[in-house]
Image (cartoon, grey):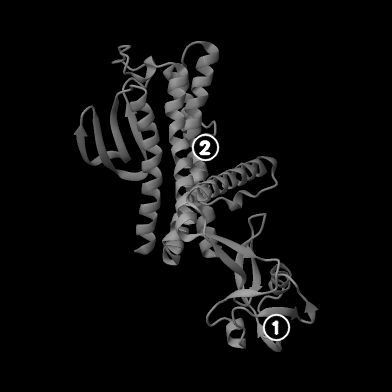
Amino acid sequence: MTTLLATIFVLGVLIFFHELGHFLAAKRSGIKVERFSLGFPPKLIGKKIGDTEYCISWIPLGGYVKMAGEDPEEKELKGEPWEFMSKPIHIRALVIFAGPAMNFILAILIFWGIVFFAGKQEVHEDTNQISLVEPGGPADKAGIKPGDRIISINGIEVSTFGEMRQIIQEHVEKPIEVKWKRDGDEYTATLTTFKDRVLDEKGELKYVGKIGIGPSYTIVKVGFFRSFWEGIDTSIFILKESIKFIYGLITGTASIKLLGGPVFIAQVAGETAKAGIANLLSFMALLSVNLSFVNVLPIPILDGGHLLFLGIEKIKGRPLTIKQRAAMQQVGLAFLILLIIFVTYNDFLRLIK
């Protein structure tokens, strides 16, 4: 139940803010909005306020904003000033771009709030001091406590958490000798690691050894404005990583097996919800940045595809015909359907493994 509720919450918020971006930009530009819907038809419930019908529909795979006169060959197109097609190309482009932009703004606001209220966590991996010990884990059973310093593993001296992690991960479900120091006293114990699954850079599952410890860290309180810039920096960092990943898919340096679909989103949403609201909100912000980026890709049926149509219209001096638009959108839809099938297969494959 937690997973279901968390998934509905995350996707509902992301979809709402995306469509809100289109809605607000259209209203600000003087375009009549006929319908604002969360979900796709058939309609579940709805209420008309002014010129706009606000509704929730049965198919929860997205949402849409229906604007007056947005189809260039619509029979009822009258050339009224409040119609979408009556607006200059740059205004129409702004309305389309506002959806992805709103998702990016949402991510900034979420990260801003998390940093401001919870503080910024600074992890110290450059020391051999540990701060987290998993209850019931091998380290805990051996008597290792938060604040201890690991000085060697299997006789190899370590001075940073990264060095000890590398050695431990190489030993999967194998005994290792750990020596640590506490208040000037030294302790030694032989621990047996447990195995954990991770994805490598090629998207393949591999097992690594762990003993249930984490590096030391400090929570730094950040001011109102500084936390805002932290939110921007974090969102930009995720955007850059998304761009690098897509580039890697194109060049073949990143595996398509790393792509996650709806099952993966539901699984992570449930896990992060159990870990606390801050973790769930962080996951939502990460998804919001990715949704923003994916939506501006020049794929017909996405916002980026509509921006592509406007670019062609700008060059040709007239909009594409409905037949041309339909053909390109069918190709885009087929591509997205195949992609969804593939990533869902990836998700189930991960669950099975």
Give me the residue at 62% from left, 87% from top: 142
The kind of secondary structure element at disc 2 is helix
User: Horizontal and vertical percent for residue 193?
Assistant: 64, 79
Mark earlier in primary sequence (2, 1): 1
Residue position for label 1: 180
Q: Can residue 219 be spotted in the picture? A: yes
With 339 as the anchor, is 154 left or right in this view?
A: right
Q: Quadrant of the C terminus?
A: bottom right
Closer to us: 273 or 301 = 273
Please say if 5 is above or below 65.
below
Please say if 94 is above or below 339.
above
Amino acid type for the residue under numbered disc 2? Phe
User: Horizontal and vertical percent for residue 312?
Assistant: 53, 18
Please say if 192 is above or below 250.
below
Amino acid type for the residue under numbered disc 1? Trp
- Label 2 and label 1: CA atoms lie apart by 55 Å
With 204 as the anchor, is 61 left or right in this view?
A: left
Please say if 205 is above or below 87.
below
User: Horizontal and vertical percent for residue 125?
Assistant: 67, 66
Using the rendered view, name the quadrant where residue 7 is placed: bottom left
Q: Can residue 267 be spotted in the picture? A: no
Q: How many marks?
A: 2
Circle 1 crowding by C-alpha within 10 Å: few under 14, some 14–19, many from 20: many
The kind of secondary structure element at disc 1 is strand
Give me the residue at 47% from left, 55% from top: 116
With 284 as the anchor, is 133 left or right in this view?
A: right
Res. 335 mark: 2
Give me the residue at 45% from left, 26% from top: 94
Q: Quadrant of the N terminus?
A: bottom left
Q: Nearer the viewer, mark 2 or mark 1?
A: 1
